[in-house]
Image (cartoon, rainbow, N blue to C red):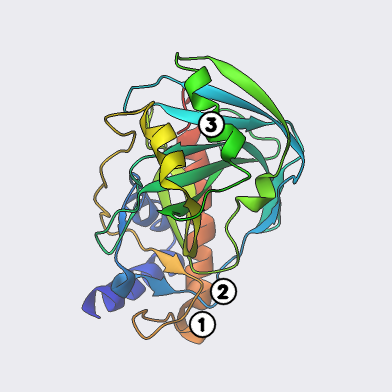
């Protein structure tokens, strides 16, 4: 627990010392994906939950993004109207896409695939104010919602090829209530912009059949995931208290943590200015 006490002290000092916040928070910016070690994540009793309002009948463009490049993917781009709420702000779902194998690891273990939902705060542009939701994918029954998506991949073999779907139920793919890990990370493809608000859900995975996974793998025979990156002192917070998860004492540290978090958000917004939206995967 030494690391936690050290962090608590640093957070408190950062929150209470004028001028120290920027240098303290700059140190916690970093890259994605990461390995999530559940014994080292911190339970935050003031965890800010996401509230999804994704469409159940969206018009969707399915687009080949640079297959078979390892930084490529197959992207679902919905018509406007799918949103989520976080910390009093509304975010638009810009696109969702897949990685094979998973990018994040849980206690050093990869999952067969991972889905990412890329959301952006309304009114922001470029790579400002991104919030990415990750959900692990496991092998199971065929996903009927995703059947037209995955079975159509072979019809878009080249970069920028696309096809359209209607009445697509995005809400059926979103994470269900459950164990969520929150941290500040980056895009996992160029330009690797930092300051991305990451929420990685574990608990109830999304299931795809092996056939569906193979349909995606055919477009990316070498995979399309980035290796895990160093945590570099970043704190991963979670919404579910467990015996393995050290708890932040809300009376002693809750306000300091909230101040640190809001300061971090300011630093992130500042650092993100000037980047163009080259690729968000
Ligand atoms: Zn991604």
Q: Residues within 10 Å of mark 2 (few under 14, many from 20)?
A: some
At a point 45% along the width and 16% down the height, the residue shown is 157
Q: Are marks 1 and 2 in contact (CB under 8 Å)?
A: yes
Q: Does ligand 1 reach within 8 Å of label 2's beta carbon?
A: no
- Which image quadrant is residue 4 in? bottom left
Q: Nearer the viewer, residue 184 or 80?
A: 80
* Residue 250 location (% of width, % of height): 51, 82
The reply to whether residue 127 is in sight is no
Give percent across and percent down for residue 142.
52, 49
**In front of the other: label 1 or label 2?**
2
Q: Give yes or no for contact between labels 3 and 1 (Cβ–Cβ under 8 Å).
A: no
Q: Quadrant of the C terminus?
A: top left
Tell me if residue 29 comes above or below residue 80 in the rendering.
Answer: below
Residue at which label 2 appears: 46
Q: Which mark is residue 250?
A: 1
Left or right: 58 with respect to 63? right
Classify 10 Å Cα crowding around label 3: few (below 14), some (14-19), many (20 and above). few
Question: At numbered mark 1, what does the secondary structure look like: helix, strand or loop?
Answer: helix
Name the foreground residue: 168 vs 188: 168
Q: Can you tell which mark lies on residue 151? A: 3
């Amino acid at each position: 627990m030494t690391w936690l006490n050290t962090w608590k002290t640093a957070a408190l000092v950062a929150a209470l010392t004028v001028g120290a916040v920027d240098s303290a928070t700059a140190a916690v910016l970093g890259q994605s994906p990461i390995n999530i070690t559940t014994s080292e994540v911190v339970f935050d009793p003031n965890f800010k939950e996401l509230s999804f309002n994704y469409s159940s009948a969206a018009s969707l463009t399915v687009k080949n993004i640079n297959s078979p490049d390892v930084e490529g993917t197959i992207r679902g781009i919905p018509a406007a109207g799918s949103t989520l709420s976080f910390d009093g702000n509304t975010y638009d779902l810009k696109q969702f896409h897949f990685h094979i194998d998973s990018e994040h690891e849980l206690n050093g273990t990869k999952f067969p695939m991972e889905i990412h939902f890329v959301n952006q705060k309304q009114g922001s542009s470029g790579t400002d104010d991104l919030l990415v939701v990750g959900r692990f994918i496991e092998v199971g029954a065929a996903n009927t919602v995703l059947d037209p998506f995955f079975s159509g991949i072979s019809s878009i073999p080249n970069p920028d090829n696309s096809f359209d779907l209607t009445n697509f139920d995005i809400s059926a793919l979103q994470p269900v209530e459950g164990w969520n890990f929150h941290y500040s990370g980056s895009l996992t493809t160029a330009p690797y912009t930092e300051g991305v608000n990451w929420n990685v859900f574990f608990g109830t995975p999304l299931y795809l059949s092996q056939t569906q996974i193979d349909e995606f793998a055919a477009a990316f025979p070498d995979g399309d995931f980035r290796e895990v990156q160093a945590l570099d002192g970043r704190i991963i917070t979670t919404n579910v208290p467990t015996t393995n998860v050290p708890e932040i004492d809300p009376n002693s540290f809750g306000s300091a943590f909230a101040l640190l978090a809001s300061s971090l958000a300011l630093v992130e917004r500042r650092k993100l200015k000037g980047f163009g939206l080259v690729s968000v995967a």
